[in-house]
Image (cartoon, grey):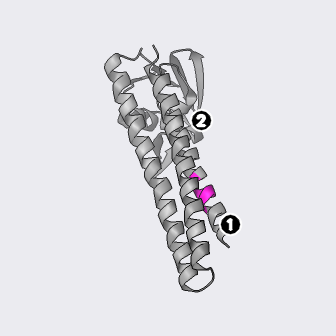
């Protein structure tokens, strides 16, 4: 029973790590990547829809993205969504597609991006700790209902703490790697 609960915790914590990596892929590092814009929510028939479901995104040059909407009527909505995002990019609309030119990052902008990365890292650490809190609550309920002994509860809590520490180390390693990537000129 404890092993199943710890496995559930591990799956939920890994989910938080996967979400973090997806988030960090959208933070630009000076190179053009479709991941930069593919998750931007675009208002489409009243519902926020990820850009990647509305358009094809390609990289014609190292510092440029080309967005071709499947439905030409969504061009304006895509343009508005890009302007509203935290990317700080200005879309160039030619009537059929949108071109995004990525300017070289300034030192100040790099530092801002590192702050954004650090905020996302902290959100993920909090998510991992929330999973730990929920699982400890479950384990204590099991002990209260006499499904596990007090010793089993202590062992389970120790195992859960080790798992939490390992996951937070992975979060820190991911963040360090992304920060280095952003700061390299």
Secondary structure, mark 1, is helix
Name above or below for residue 15 compared with residue 153: above
Q: Which residue is drawn at 51% across and 18% down?
A: 64
The 10 Å Cα crowd at callout 1, few under 14, some 14 to 19, many 20 or more, is few
C-alpha distance separating marks 1 and 2: 48 Å
- Disc 1 or disc 2, which is closer to the eye? 1
Residue at numbered disc 1:
3
Q: Residue at x 48, y 35 (%)?
A: 175
Name above or below for residue 164 compared with residue 136: above
Residue 36, image x and y in percent?
A: 51, 31
Q: Which residue is drawn at 39% across and 30% down?
A: 114
Is residue 43 on the magenta stretch? Answer: no
Q: Where does the N terminus fall, quadrant-wise?
A: bottom right
Which of these two is toward me, 134 or 150? 150
Secondary structure, mark 2, is loop
Observer able to see residue 71: yes
Farthest bottom residue?
145
Is residue 10 on the magenta stretch? Answer: yes
**Left or right: residue 114 compared with residue 144:** left
Q: Which residue is drawn at 58% across and 20% down?
A: 59
Q: Is the magenta stretch mostly helix, strand or loop?
A: helix
Q: Residue 29 carries which label?
A: none
Which of these two is toward me, 169 or 45? 169
Mark 1 near mark 2, Cβ–Cβ under 8 Å? no
Which quadrant of the structure image shows residue 146?
bottom right
Observer able to see residue 45: no
Residue 5, image x and y in percent?
A: 63, 67
Residue 44, image x and y in percent?
A: 48, 46
Residue at numbered disc 2:
70
Q: Give the range drawn in magenta.
A: 9-13
């Amino acid at each position: 029973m404890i092993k199943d609960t710890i496995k559930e915790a591990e799956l939920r914590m890994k989910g938080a790590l996967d979400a973090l990596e997806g988030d960090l892929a959208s933070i630009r590092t000076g190179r053009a990547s479709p991941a930069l814009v593919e998750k931007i929510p675009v208002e489409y028939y009243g519902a926020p829809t990820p850009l990647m479901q509305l358009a094809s995104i390609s990289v014609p040059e190292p510092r440029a993205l080309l967005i071709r909407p499947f439905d030409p009527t969504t061009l304006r909505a895509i343009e508005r969504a890009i302007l509203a995002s935290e990317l700080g990019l200005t879309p160039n609309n030619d009537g059929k597609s949108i071109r995004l030119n990525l300017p070289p990052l300034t030192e100040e902008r790099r530092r801002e991006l590192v702050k954004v990365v650090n905020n996302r890292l902290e959100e993920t650490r909090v998510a991992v700790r929330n999973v730990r809190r929920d699982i400890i609550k479950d384990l204590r309920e099991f002990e209260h209902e006499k499904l596990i002994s007090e010793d089993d509860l202590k062992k389970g809590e120790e195992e859960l703490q080790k798992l939490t520490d390992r996951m937070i180390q992975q979060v820190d390693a991911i963040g360090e790697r992304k920060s280095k990537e952003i700061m390299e000129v």
